Image: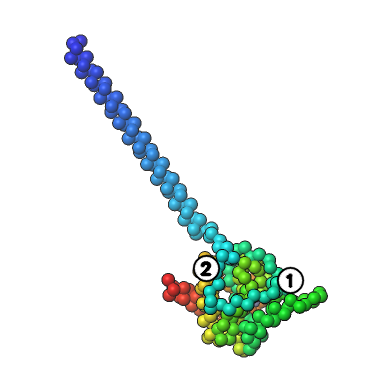
Amino acid sequence: MTPTEQELIRRQRARKRARLRRLKRRRAILISIMALVLVLLVWGIVSVVRFIFFREPVDPAAVVTPDWIDVQLLDENPYSRPGTPLERINDIVVHYTANPGTTAQQNRNYFNSLAQQNGESATSVSSHFIIGLDGEIIQCIPLSEISYASNDRNFDTVSIECCHPEADGKFTDATYQSLIRLCAWLENELKLKEGSIIRHYDVTGKLCPLYFVEHESKWNQFKEDVKDYRKQQD
Ligand SMILES: [Zn+2]
């Protein structure tokens, strides 16, 4: 072979090696991109699943009460404010007082008077909030503590008692509007899922709140009204 031929072969080999290096580099880049896409895809799927199925719970103790709620906490006592921690809230339970014509203040004072009981026939009952006939809202128990209102669901719910003028349990318009406002505020603050407003009836079958048990369509309308109220606020 002449030196020129040798030189030609050397160059050919050099080109081949360079081509191989380029191919390897491209393959490495392609694999890196595919791995990155796969990681992003898995991360995206996990995020969506977590968002839909696993709500990050809000610490009820971190919620700040607005000034349109009149805070009159009960004295700590075993019968109406046991001080048991309420660590997470999953639902809002609506009740009626079943005591026509009584005011929010009277009901709050009644809960507080239970502290004076002793003996075996003691009554244990209370509620986080009471809405009065004029729409006034009294808070009796902090969101970070349980109330005695909703039986098996006391441990993960917030309770609202509503006053009513007559035995049929129908709320006044002022009470109704305040109930919408309070439920919307709680849903927003506690980041509750849609459908988180329930009746005492849905927990135990008790006829409470009576009017909304006897008039299912009015109850559904109420939940729609809360939804609309929240949409208007957005
Ligand atoms: Zn009830």
Total marks in image: 2
**Residue ID at (22%, 14%):** 6
Determine if residue 213 is in view. Answer: no
Q: Ligand 1 is in which quadrant of the figure? A: bottom right
Q: Is residue 154 above or below residue 54?
A: below
What element does badge 2 sit on? Answer: helix
Q: Position of residue 56 (x, y in %)?
A: 53, 59
Disc 1 residue type?
Answer: Pro
Disc 2 residue type?
Answer: Glu
Query: Is the residue marked by circle 2 packed among few (<14), some (14-19), or many (20+) residues within 10 Å?
Result: some
**Residue ID at (51%, 73%):** 184
Q: Which residue is mark 2?
A: 189
Which callout, 1 or 2, points at the residue further toward the start of the chain? 1
Q: Position of residue 91 (x, y in %)?
A: 58, 68
Q: Position of residue 197 (x, y in %)?
A: 56, 72
Query: Is the residue marked by circle 1 packed among few (<14), some (14-19), or many (20+) residues within 10 Å?
Result: some
Image position of 46 (left or right of 198): left
Image position of 8 (left or right of 60): left
Spot the residue most to the right.
119
Q: Which residue is mark 1?
A: 78
Considering depth in this image, is 226 or 67 the residue closer to the camera?
67
Q: Quadrant of the N terminus?
A: top left
